[in-house]
Amino acid sequence: MTIMELLKEKGLSRYSLSKTSGVPWATLADICSGKTSLNRCSAETLSKLSKALNLSIEEILVLETEPPKSEKTGKPADKTYLETNLSPQLTKAIKDYEKGEQDNVSYLDCLWGELYGSINADLWAGCISEEQANYLRKKYLYGEQEGLND
C-alpha cells in the first residue's frame, strides 16, 4: 500500500496530515511523490507520522512511497499530448514524412532529414520541449513505438 492510498483510505489529504502531524507539507510532498524514501526520514518525522496515522513506525516504514510509473510525473501515460501545439513547419514535415512512408517514395531519406531538422529547429527555437523532441524522434524517425510510454 502506498502512503497516498493510506491517506485516501483514512480520508486525509497531505495538507491535513501535515497540520495534524507537524511534518512540513513540502516533506510530505517529497515522501508521497517518491522523491524521499520513508527509510531516509528522521526518527522525529517517522514518530510524528506514526502518531498522526495511528500506526507503528514499523508499519509506516513498510508503506510504499513511490507511486506507479504513470503517477510519478503527474503526466498521462499516453504521450500523444506531446504532439499538440506543434509549429506549422514541424506539422508539415511530419505529414510529408508519413505520406512518404505510406507511398514508399525513393526520397524518404530526404523527408527523414527534413523532419529531423524541423524537430531540432523547433527545439532550439524553444517551440517544443526536450521531452517533445525526444518523443517525436522516437516515434517518427527511429520507429520505437513500444518504448514511447517510458
Image (cartoon, rainbow, N blue to C red):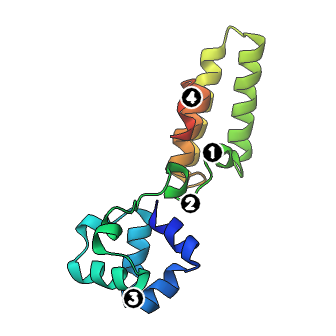
How far is mark 1 from mark 3, CA to CA?
37 Å
Inspect the image, locate mark 1, and give the three-letter code of the amino acid beneath it. Answer: Lys
User: Residue 20 at what x, y percent from top left?
Assistant: 44, 91
Check disc 4 and give the amino acid type. Glu
The disc, 1 or 4, on the residue closer to the chain's N-terminal end is: 1
Q: Is residue 117 above or below residue 75?
A: above
Task: Give the spatial CA distance, label 1 vs label 2.
Answer: 12 Å
Label 3 sits on residue: 21
Which of the two discs, 4 and 2, labels the residue nearer the N terminus?
Answer: 2
Q: Which residue is mark 4?
A: 146
Give the secondary structure at mark 1.
helix
> Is residue 145 toward the left or the right of residue 134 in the image?
right
Secondary element at image label 4: helix
Alpha-carbon span between mark 3 and mark 4: 44 Å
Q: Residue at x 71, y 17 (%)?
A: 101
**Residue hosting label 2:** 74
